[in-house]
Image (cartoon, grey):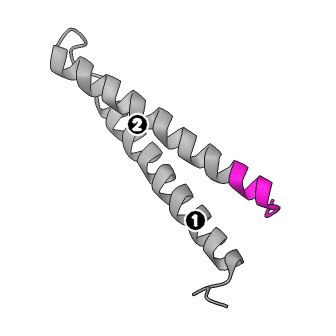
Amino acid sequence: MTDLVPSGVFQWFLILTTGLVAGLWFVHDIVFLARLRGTDRKDPLVHDQRFGYMMGIVIGMIGVIGALLYMHDTGVI
């Protein structure tokens, strides 16, 4: 046996790291997008920031959903 850790521990490590990073990314971009509410929408820099935060929210959602689907496929939930 050449495994450093059992496969169940490794799966939980993957689930927790991916889910936590994606969840924090999602919350971070929601907060920063909320801070842009009162800014000028015609300013190109604000528009680029808004677009970037929206893409970050999408990436965070994909990460969280992917972690949940992985948990479902492996039989954890």
Residue sitting at x 46%, y 43%: 26
**Vertical placement of residue 9 versus 45, above or below:** below
Residue type beneath disc 1: Leu
Q: Residues within 10 Å of mark 1 (few under 14, many from 20)?
A: some
Residue sitting at x 26%, y 27%: 49
What's the magenta region?
Answer: 69-77
- Please name which of the two marks, 2 or 1, marks the residue nearer to the observer: 1
Q: Quadrant of the C terminus?
A: bottom right
**Vertical placement of residue 39 versus 28, above or below:** above
- Tell which circle, 2 or 1, labels the residue nearer the N-terminal end: 1
Q: Residues within 10 Å of mark 2 (few under 14, many from 20)?
A: many
Mark 2 residue element: helix
Residue sitting at x 21%, y 21%: 46
Q: 46 or 19: nearer the eye? A: 19
Disc 2 target residue: 56
Residue sitting at x 65%, y 69%: 11
**Vertical placement of residue 26 versus 49, above or below:** below
Q: Main secondary structure of the magenta part?
A: helix
Residue type beneath disc 2: Gly
Provide residue 7's location: percent of width, then percent of height: 68, 77
Quadrant in the rendering for residue 54: top left
Disc 1 target residue: 14
Provide residue 20's location: percent of width, then percent of height: 51, 59
Is residue 65 shown left or right of residue 40? right
Provide residue 63's location: percent of width, then percent of height: 54, 46
